[in-house]
Structure formats: C-alpha cells, structure tokens
Image (cartoon, grey):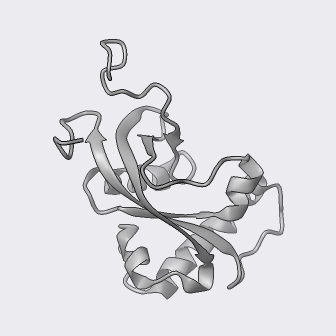
Amino acid sequence: MSSDADPHGLAGLPKALFAFPGPLRDTLVEAILDGRKTSTTGLVAEYEVEREPLPREGERSVVVDSSDHPVAIIETTGVRIVPIADVDLDHAVAEGEGHTTVEDWRRDHESFWHSDDMRAALGDPTFAVTDATQVVLERFRLVTRLDATPADPTS
C-alpha cells in the first residue's frame, strides 16, 4: 500500500541499474519506457562479485536514470541462466537495442563487458567472455512509468 510520502510504493524496492550512468544507460532506460526493451542480460560473475541475489520471477524493482532518479517500476517475468553461447535471437531482439542477429547482440555486449569500467567492477582487469560464460537472461514488464499512469491499471 502506498502512502503520501511514497506515492509509487518505492520503499524497499531494489534499484534496477542498466549499464553505467551515461549515454548507454539513458538509451536503455528510454527503451524500457517506450516498451522496446523487455529483456536484459547480466553476467553471473557480476552478481557474485556484488553479492547480489539473482533476480526472481515476480520481483519488482525501480529503474533509475543516469542521475539516479526513479523513472519506472518493472517486474521480472522470467529468469534463465545459460552459457552465453545459448542466448537466442528472441532474447537478443527483446533487449530493444536494434539487434537483428545474435552475433551483433553478442559483439555489443562483449564490448561492454570487456570495457575498463566493467573489468574494474568485476575486479578482474583481464576478464573475457567465452562461449561458456554464464549469463542471466531476465525478462521483465513495465509496471509503472513514474512520470505517468501505470502501464497496466490492474497492477
């Protein structure tokens, strides 16, 4: 139940962080808000380093922009853990980044995961993705845009 101090029911919800603050996060957040992005991929290693639990179906989280402002609430609708070699086209397309092949999707993701920022976050300056690298494939739905009305009035 929401209160006047927390009209969107954000208290206690974890943040959903997409990429690092900056242009990529802004692009991904916009894709969530306009409905193009309904999936995301994370490294199992990142969850382990951050000591964060893996996402679970039914969990809700708050999407924040590059300024750390809450912009939406999403709900996880599915989670799979697979080797990166098993990511399918349906998942890649649902990421809403315009990929039309798994190869393009993987190339872009590897570029991000091999970046200095990600390697620093993982504490491994030589981290490299292989076909066996375990990834978390998360599906989600937009529940509420925090600047608008709920995406699904039954939420």
What quarter of the picture does the C terminus occupy? top left
Left or right: 52 with respect to 109? right
Q: Viewed as shown, does residue 113 lie left or right of 49?
A: left
Identify the residue at image location x=21%, y=39%: 150
| Image quadrant where one finds the N terminus | top left
Residue 53's place in the image compared with 145, above or below, is below
| Residue 55 picture location, percent across and down | 54, 53
Q: Position of residue 120 (x, y in %)?
A: 77, 54
On the picture, is 22 further left or further right than 128?
left
Count of number-bearing discs: 0
Where residue 48 sits in the image (x, y, percent)?
A: 74, 55
Q: Nearer the viewer, residue 21 or 42?
A: 42
Residue 153 sits in quarter? top left
Residue 27 sits in quarter: bottom left
Q: What residue do we see at 33% from left, 57% from top?
A: 31
Return the residue nearer the eye: 83 or 154: 154
Q: Residue 28: percent from the left, percent from the top?
A: 41, 56
> For the point 51% across and 54% down, which residue is it?
56
Is residue 68 in view? yes
Q: Is residue 74 shown above or below 27?
A: above
In this view of the protein, can residue 117 be seen by the observer?
no
Tell me what residue is drawn at x 27 percent, y 40 percent: 145
Q: Residue furthest top?
A: 4
In this image, 152 relative to 23: left or right?
left
